[in-house]
Amino acid sequence: MKNIALILGVLLISFGAFAQQENNVKQSDLKGPAYKNYKHWMHKTEPTKIYSDNNKKSLQGPAYKNQKPGKNTVEQDLVEVKIGSDRQKLTGPAYKNHGPWSKKG
């Protein structure tokens, strides 16, 4: 009897531990009301890095039509695209008083 009570106690504690785990659900995985009622602020998202080709050739005619853009991509020619600025992270008086003379840091 003691063993059964001990096992049930351990199971109860372990279920409580699983309930504390973070939610790693993407909105694209959901359907129906769960998709509609998705709370963006309750889930962590990581920004996706976007790369652009630095040296694009301007082609015309059949060369443009027959090009294969994914085939000739060299990692050395890619440049990371950055969106936003440091000002977006500021709040309050620091945001209000930010100007072109402010140091980048």
Image: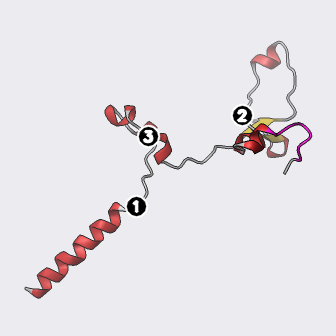
Asked whether 76 falls inside the magenta stretch, the response is no
Name the residue: 34% across, 68% down: 17
First-in-chain label (1 vs 3):
1
Taking the image as shown, residue 29 lies to the left or right of residue 103, namely: left
For the residues bearing labels 1 and 3, Cβ distance under 8 angstroms: no
Q: Residue at x 72, y 44 (%)?
A: 90
Please identify the residue farthest to the front as the structure is shown.
93
What residue is at 37 percent from the left and 62 percent from the top? 20
| Magenta-colored span | 97-103
Q: Which label belongs to residue 70? A: 2
The disc label shown at residue 9, or none: none
Task: Point out the image quarter for the N terminus.
Answer: bottom left
At mark 1, the secondary structure is: loop
Question: Where's residue 80, x and y in %?
Answer: 78, 42
Residue carrying label 1: 21
Mark 2 touches mark 3? (CB < 8 Å): no
Decide if residue 43 is on the left or right side of residue 99. left
From the image, state whether disc 1 or disc 2 is nearer to you.
Answer: 1
- Give, as a three-letter code, the residue at label 3: Lys
